[in-house]
Image (cartoon, grey):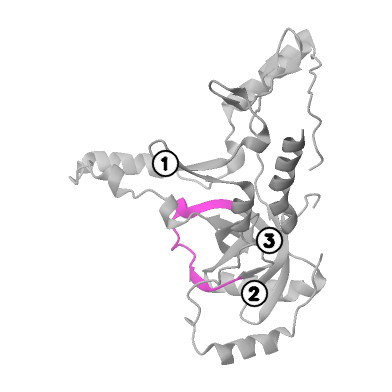
Amino acid sequence: MAARPIWRGQIRLALVSIPVEIYPATRSGASIQFHQVHEPSGKRIKYEKVVPGIGPVDRDEIMKGYEVSKGHYVLLDPEEIESVKLESRKTVDLVQFVDIGEIDAMYYEKPYYVVPADDLAEEAFVVLRDALREARKVGIGQLAMRGQEYVVALKPCGRGMLLETLRYAEEVNKASSFFREIGDHKPDQDLLDLASTLIEKKSGEFDPKEFHNRYVDALKGLIKEKQRKKGEKVIQDPDADAPPSRGSNVIDLMAALKKSLGESGGANDNKGAKKPAGKKASAKKAAAPAKKAAQRKRA
């Protein structure tokens, strides 16, 4: 596994903590990305931040604004936004278990592979994986990462497990607002039988390898053909690209599970995950704007 984990931490079920690593399950390599190039000079095009009537502005003078009403904004500086970001907690608490088919597909957002962080974590990892599989359940928890908090679903996936981020309820449009104009009449039975026959005829197992993005394939063919005929052009990029612990704290599994059952007092004690504390802005970051202002004043 050449990829680097995007998150290291623990999945916790009551008193059992399982050190894990999380890796992206998807990649964007299938798409084609273009850059804008100034053909006469052979240089990449850059975008400047400009204000109408003023022109280009310094990045230090830019603030983020939230439009509360037409033309009215609340301005926030980076330190204020940073102060409410959540700390990247190293624990995902499984607080609820639901039937594997209970979550609507529209709530699933992005998948990640979950693997045990080391050999000591593997036993507890396998027990949780197989327990979920036998129960046909999905574990639900919350994960704080990169300053934001995600609802996540954990389920078995082959020898490992799959963690999928879920959309919050307010991110999903209600279907009724789109479907209200569709009538509730029943279709003609002959047409329904014909459609059912066609569906049955074309039924089979889903194989994603059978499907290709024909537009991307055509673009790749065009690029390869033009490279063969006209070669490549060296483009000057003025900006150099900046270069972008395994835990083993697993307590005795059987004792921990028994103790968890004894102390829980019921299956529904925890209805939600604890919200992690907000991250405080450092004094160094808070002092940065004042220092820059003083330097401009002296200049």
Q: Residue at x 67, y 76 (%)?
A: 127
Give the foreground label among 3 and 2.
2
- 106 up-or-down from 295: above or below: below
Packing grade of label 1 (10 A; few <14, some 14-19, many >=20) is few
User: Which residue position is annotated with label 1?
Assistant: 201
Locate residue 216, reporting x and y percent: 62, 27
Q: Amino acid at mark 3?
A: Val
Q: Looking at the rendered structure, which numbered label has been put on residue 14?
A: none
Q: Earlier in the sequence, mark 1 or mark 3?
A: 3
Question: Mark 3–mark 2 contact, CB under 8 Å?
Answer: no
Mark 2 secondary-structure assignment: strand
State whether residue 74 is above or below residue 274: above
Query: Residue 296 in magenta?
Result: no
Q: Is residue 255 left or right of residue 51?
A: right
Q: Amino acid at mark 2?
A: Arg
Taking 178 as reference, is 272 left or right? right
